[in-house]
Image (cartoon, rainbow, N blue to C red):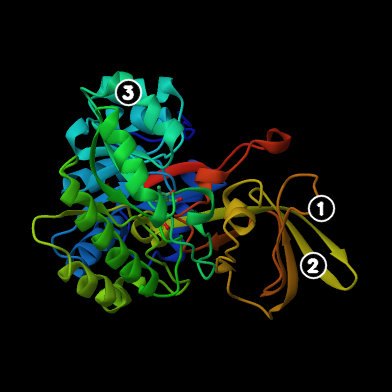
Amino acid sequence: MRQTKSKLASADAPILEAPYRREALEALVARYGSPLFLIDCNVVRERYGQLSAALPGVELHYALKPLPELGVVRALAAVGASFDLATSGEVALVKAAGIPAERCIHTHPIKRDSEIRDALRYGVRTFVVDNEDEIGKFVKHRTRAELLLRISFRNPTAAADLSKKFGCTPGDAPQLLALAGRLGLKVRGLSFHVGSQVADAAAHASAVDACSAILAAGRQTGQHPLDVLDIGGGFPTYLDGSEGEKIHAFCAPIRAALARLPAGIRVIAEPGRFLVGAAGTCLTSVVGRARREGRWWYYLDDGVYGTFSGQIFDAVRYPIDSLKTEGERTPATLTGPTCDSIDVIREGLLLPELEAGDVLVGRMMGAYTTACATDFNFVPRARVLTVNP
Ligand SMILES: Cc1ncc(COP(=O)(O)O)c(C=O)c1O
């Protein structure tokens, strides 16, 4: 399991009022050091409530991958969330959080037998497959596992088209269902993921309609229960944090499509970034500076190999500013601590003149940031601090 370093026990976790005041952030850096990564559980709970209201009747399984943190799992469990796991490390994390296995599904379409066994040993019963070989892996587990068949719906407009790498075509579904039936496996339903950070929910809605037809046809064979539809993740965040107020309108086409499903289908979603994107704040300090070609270059203790890795892996440019506000702002360059020249966070950012020790704050950094951070150059990762547990 990827362990975040220096995680605080929740009993020690600070209570912070949002929006955070400069003095509060400076006090945290003085106390805990820099770089620091704050996760605000109040925001996570708020987003969970907003998405639940936007998708009534849909079981929300938090996809751990964007922010696999104990504090987040505990906060979400306390408000009724379920969980979407993809690796044995994620199984270990929910286990550590004391989450009952019945509240978890395993959705990685391609996995080792050891990972299937780890999840089964924990008590997970629902797994995802998308091809013949993967179906075959479950023959020996058929008395304990039931399957969701993942269908691909390509969506080039998504920031990450997750139907390119995974999923069978809708046309392949009948023969895969038949194969599973012949092998004595129970297919509980279908799943899809129309891509992460989608522009609108049209792709979700048409995928629901297409799955509805596959479910109806599949049910006629009587081989499988086919009473579950997992509509994946993809619910977007916005850099101004407005996703909470926009999510109800965003989900309108999904609600309409779900209303067209035959009665008795249990619907699951696997939201990731929507629940945690706004909850993450990065605090990083100036280590040194240099004047190059008439501009300040500030060398920070966090960068694109660390918490800002989402700029590379997720193509997001997070809002970043200095805590210091006094003084004339001029265009400056922010770089990370490694020796690599791609480790540049931002160029031409208007900043007051900074010096070593001054703190910068990156916002909207909860999803796919610290989760993707590396140890390149042996630069220590940001310390993770859960606030408002
Ligand atoms: C199977 C699966 N479910 C859920 C998610 C979460 O997606 P998002 O963060 O876009 O909500 C992902 C992201 O990669 C995924 O692969």
Residue assigned mark 1: 341
| Quadrant holding the N terminus | top left
Disc 1 marks a residue whose amino acid type is Ser
Residue assigned mark 3: 139
Mark 1, mark 3: which one is toward the viewer? 3
Mark toward the start of the polypeptide (1 vs 3): 3
The quadrant holding residue 8 is: top left
Q: Is mark 1 within 8 Å of ligand 1?
A: no
Residue assigned mark 2: 296
Instruction: Please say if the residues under marks 2 and 1 sit with CB atoms less than 8 Å apart.
Output: no
Quick one: label 2, few (<14), some, or many (20+) residues within 10 Å? Answer: many
* Local secondary structure at mark 3: helix
Across and down, in percent, residue 105 comes to: 28, 39
State how far apart marks 1 and 3 are (Cα).
50 Å
Disc 3 marks a residue whose amino acid type is Val
Disc 2 marks a residue whose amino acid type is Trp
Quick one: label 3, few (<14), some, or many (20+) residues within 10 Å? Answer: some
Q: Is residue 340 left or right of residue 228?
A: right
Q: Is mark 3 within 8 Å of ligand 1?
A: no
Residue 15 visible from this viewpoint: yes
Mark 2, mark 1: which one is toward the viewer? 1
Q: Nearer the viewer, residue 385 or 127?
A: 127
Q: Nearer the viewer, residue 280 or 331?
A: 280
Residue 13 visible from this viewpoint: no
Q: Residue at x 36, y 57 (%)?
A: 233
State how far apart marks 2 and 1 are (Cα).
16 Å
State how far apart marks 3 and 2 are (Cα).
62 Å
Mark 3, mark 2: which one is toward the viewer? 3
The quadrant holding residue 289 is: bottom right
